[in-house]
Amino acid sequence: MSDEDDVPRLSSHALAALQEFYIEQEREGTKTPQGINKYSVGSVEENWQLSQFWYDNETASRLADEAVMAAGRGGRIACVSAPSVYQKLKEKDGKDFSAYILEYDKRFAIYGEEFFFYDYNDPLNFPENLAPHSFDIVIADPPYLSEECLRKTAGTIKYLTKGKILLCTGAIMEEQAAECLGVKMCKFIPKHTRNLANEFRCYANYDSGLDSDSSCSENTEKKS
């Protein structure tokens, strides 16, 4: 998404039709390579052109655990541009929560009805079955380190969440994150499978377990 202004915008009707197409592809057997669990972190390779850099295993696990705890029994969790957290949640095969992934990368359509195409440039363009304030917690990792990207993603987060927000982005976005979402920086420091130049942190608007010790980020070496 280097040419962000050139990304096509879809109407709600077209988006719903596209969603149905992706689901049908899943039914027809779209698969990851043989022998690889499609929910394993790394089963979908990073695409640097989409600014994708996955969390390491410890970070993905910690964020998934935090999301489950914050959502509560029977909770619904939305992972916005945070696919490795979604994958960790699915690895848990939990019966007490449900998880959904909102992603621009159409390769994640392999997750069927739990996948929603998401373009932060059109932050509220969702199908009708994605109801407002229907998630107990939203964990989001905006794809770029820019105020514009954060503000647009914040609109999505506010639409989806019942209240709880867990944000992973650059340390340089602390002031903007507080302004947009009322979140505060956590002690836990996220790490990626690759060493990135930017410092990443986690932010929450509730008393999270991520403040209990050291060591949150994902999918993007956000670009300022």
Image (cartoon, rainbow, N blue to C red):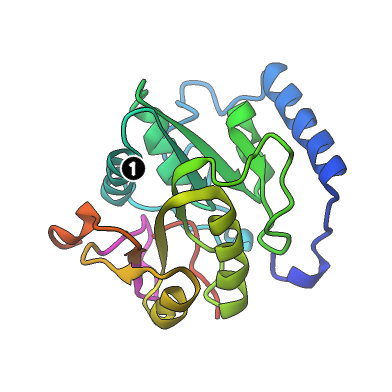
Percent x, y for residue 117? 68, 44
Task: In the rendered view, tell whether residue 143 sits above or below residue 28.
Answer: below
Percent x, y for residue 6? 82, 68
Q: Which residue is mark 1?
A: 64
Dot 1 falls on a residue whose secondary structure is helix
For this view, does 40 lie left or right of residue 10?
A: left
* Quadrant for the N terminus in the image: bottom right
Where on the picture, by quarter, is residue 19? top right
Quick check: is 211 in the magenta stretch? Answer: no
Say which residue appears at 55% left-offset and 41% top-offset. Answer: 101
Percent x, y for residue 124? 70, 55
What residue span does the magenta drawing correspond to? 189-201
Viewer-proximal residue, 178 or 187? 178
Viewer-proximal residue, 153 or 192? 153
Say which residue appears at 44% left-offset and 74% top-offset. Answer: 177
Q: Is residue 92 visible?
A: yes
